[in-house]
């Protein structure tokens, strides 16, 4: 059925496919930066700010698509060893490589052009996002082939997106370091869960290693241990941020824990949807948990809870006599 659908598409559509427009959904990770700039940096939703957010999302999507195109080009040899990805446009031979490289450059330049019109910190973060695509994909570094470093390099795009949302609102200083670290670590947890699901889906060590060299070192036990490590780091950094900046946000904790739990459960499924994060919007329980988390978070930013501030107030220790 999929082969028939591909055959009926025009040849140029392959170039749309490698830009992965369906992955633009990931730019939703910019929005917490927008909300936090309003709450912590005293920004407001003026008409100019809304226009900047609109441009920022387009700029981020274009830069991300530039990275996706490069990823598709350089991953083609390994994708031919994957049971599903071998039908992608580049490994299937439906794309001219020189034209694809031109697409990579055009998308990047277009994204930078929009980013420049917003402000300089936003432009720097957009360039950082693009450079991470080079580090992740291009030899001799090609971080995606190195265990642990592959997850950390890919997941750092999450705090970059947070900063893109933050600076799109015109914030003129760096977002809290504890929040940046928490955002990075929860992204690492999501990526490690994706690796775990991919490893189980392939279910063959030799085939997994041919697809991704990091799977020489990875196995199910190590990937589970790494997920525990990342989610523990996330929890501790989030706790530091909540206590220091807005203790009311502690009401989000059970909702965040529910998102983590549901994501882990999804990663254990046969042919897990976690392998394709851009399709996770179809997972109703996960989307409901994320929606409730967002609603509770916005409410906690808006309303003060004096009893909670008193309960978690940091006091000096009582001296011993």
Image (cartoon, grey):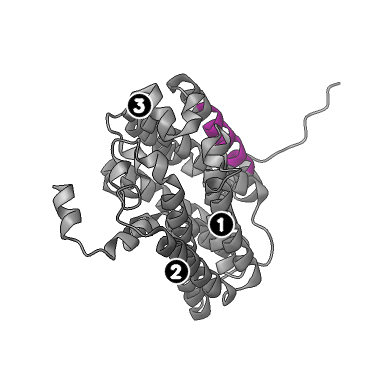
Instruction: Choose top left, top right, bottom left or bottom right for residue 116.
Output: bottom right
Q: Which mark is residue 58?
A: 2
Front: mark 2 or 3: 3
Task: Please indicate, yes or no, whether residue 51 appears anywhere in the rendered image.
Answer: yes
Residue matched to label 1? 129
Residue at point 29%, 56% (across, down) = 94
Q: Secondary structure at mark 1?
A: helix
Residue in the foreground of this view, choosing between 235 and 95: 95
Numbered range of the magenta stretch: 228-240
- The reply to whether residue 151 is visible in this rendering is no
For the residues labelled 2 and 1, say whether their Cβ atoms are less than 8 Å apart. no
Report the residue marked by disc 3.
Answer: 200
Ranked by sequence position, the earlier of labels 2 and 1 is 2
Give left or right: position of 177 versus 212. Answer: right
Q: Position of residue 178 (x, y in %)?
A: 64, 45
Q: Is residue 236 magenta?
A: yes
Q: In what quadrant of the picture does the C terminus appear?
A: top right
For the point 49% across and 63% down, which residue is it?
63
């Amino acid at each position: 059925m999929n082969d028939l659908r591909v055959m009926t598409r025009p040849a140029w559509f392959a170039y749309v496919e490698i830009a992965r427009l369906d992955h633009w959904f990931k730019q939703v990770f910019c929005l917490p930066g927008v909300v936090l700039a309003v709450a912590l940096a005293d920004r407001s939703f003026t008409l100019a700010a809304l226009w900047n957010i609109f441009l920022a999302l387009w700029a981020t999507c274009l830069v991300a698509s530039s990275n996706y195109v490069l990823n598709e080009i350089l991953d083609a040899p390994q994708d031919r060893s994957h049971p599903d990805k071998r039908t992608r446009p580049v490994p299937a031979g439906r794309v001219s490589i020189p034209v694809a490289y031109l697409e990579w450059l055009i998308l990047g330049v277009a994204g930078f052009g929009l980013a420049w019109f917003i402000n300089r910190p936003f432009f720097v973060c957009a360039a950082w996002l693009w450079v991470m695509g080079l580090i992740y994909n291009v030899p001799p570094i090609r971080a995606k082939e190195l265990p642990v470093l592959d997850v950390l390099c890919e997941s750092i795009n999450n705090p970059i997106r947070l900063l893109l949302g933050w600076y799109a609102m015109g914030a003129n200083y760096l977002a809290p370091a504890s929040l940046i670290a928490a955002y990075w670590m929860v992204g690492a947890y999501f990526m490690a869960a994706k690796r775990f699901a991919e490893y189980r889906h392939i279910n063959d060590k030799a085939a997994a290693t041919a697809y991704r060299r990091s799977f020489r070192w990875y196995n199910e036990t190590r990937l589970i241990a790494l997920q525990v490590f990342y989610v523990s780091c996330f929890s501790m950094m989030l706790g530091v941020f909540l206590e220091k900046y807005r203790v009311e946000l502690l009401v989000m904790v059970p909702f965040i824990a529910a998102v983590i739990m549901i994501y882990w459960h999804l990663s254990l499924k046969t042919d897990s949807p976690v392998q394709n994060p851009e399709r996770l919007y179809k997972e109703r329980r996960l989307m409901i948990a994320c929606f409730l988390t967002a609603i509770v978070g916005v409410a906690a930013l808006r309303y003060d809870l004096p009893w909670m501030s008193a309960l978690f107030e940091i006091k000096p220790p009582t001296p011993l006599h």
